[in-house]
Amino acid sequence: MMTRGATRMTRLMMGHMGPRYFSTALLRSDAGAGVSGVVGAGMLHRFPASPSEKSVVNWARNYSVMGSRSASTVALNDDKQPEKDQKAENGGGSAAAASGGGVEKSVVSYWGVPQTKATKPDGTEWKWNCFRPWETYQADTSIDLTKHHAPVTFLDKFAYWTVKFLRYPTDIFFQRRYGCRAMMLETVAAVPGMVGGMLLHCKSLRRFEQSGGWIKALLEEAENERMHLMTFMEVAKPKWYERALVFAVQGVFFNAYFVTYILSPKLAHRIVGYLEEEAIHSYTEFLKELDNGNIENVPAPAIAIDYWRLPKDSTLRDVVLVVRADEAHHRDVNHFASDIHYQGQQLKDSPAPLGYH
């Protein structure tokens, strides 16, 4: 390591000689400037720079570049380097022009990972990267919305009244702002499927056993709930305190559900089943407000039209209908999963309802 004195000496020398050796003005050959002592002076004297001084300056400037290229594997292809540099410059220029013209820039993968470009059935370009055309579907809105699991056992009653208790602060906070209420509901509803799928995944790895497709089914549920959130984000713009509330609620609920699922999966799935029943009720009230004209029935977001394969002239009411149908399917799946555990079996013993949104 350099001592403090050596460091100061180096700084002093570079302060005096750096501008002389590394200034672009040294390459000038303006004799008049050299005599007057301005920028065009030579390295050590106030005279025009000689050819030898110019060569020294050029060598000092380019030494690091030459050294790195000599010690690099790129030196093996030095004859092709100018051509590559020229192509890179042309590519950068075209990319910049494309970005200025509004054309999306593509990422070039060194690892050869292909970038698939999907299209719609009509041949137009697919513009969503968060989901692909083969992940879209048409919701079954004919599902029975009135089904209810009557709580009989102690765990069922505990799950039922826990959900009822959690509904009261939600009603007080959001009241009749169902757009924001739906947004908050989906930030919570997307957690159980991810937690359950993650824990079943780890269990499958520990026990060297298959899962009966339940890992994928629960992750499908989580992804479907997340798409609900992406849709309602286009409708209801959350305020800063609502975003802060999402942080708090998600942090508490994630950990609470994680522990609950480890201790009793049948209780965890039953809680989600009752949560989905409350979601059906909330979306039904949402529809009433839309029908009464208290909430404007705006056009459906483009992401919702593509995800649920809705007609192009669909409205917010159509979106709420398909979302409510999804919640009814999630209700059935989680009550079914809890029943499997109540019958003394494991989820892997029964085929999972894959694709049952």
Image (tube, rainbow, N blue to C red):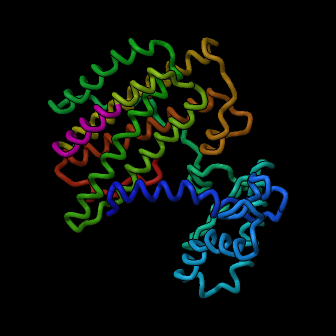
Q: Position of residue 253 (x, y in %)?
A: 30, 33
Residue drawn at (72%, 71%) of the image: 54
Asked whether the viewer can see residue 256, the reply is: yes
The residue closer to the viewer here, 24 or 283, is 24
The residue closer to the viewer here, 278 or 120, is 120
How many badges with numbers are in the image? Answer: 0
**Which portion, as a residue range, is magenta?**
250-263
Residue drawn at (40%, 14%) of the image: 173
Give the dominant element type of the magenta stretch: helix, strand or loop: helix
Q: Position of residue 2 (x, y in %)?
A: 34, 62
User: With respect to residue 112, does 213 lie above or below?
Assistant: above
Q: Determine which quarter of the picture holds residue 191.
A: top left
The residue closer to the viewer here, 330 or 199, is 199
User: With respect to residue 130, does 30 lie above or below?
Assistant: below
Q: Quadrant of the N terminus?
A: bottom left
Residue drawn at (30%, 22%) of the image: 166
Residue drawn at (25%, 64%) of the image: 205
Say whether residue 341 is magenta: no
Q: Position of residue 303 (x, y in %)?
A: 63, 41
Task: Using residue 328 as the reference point, say whether residue 102 is left or right of it.
Answer: right
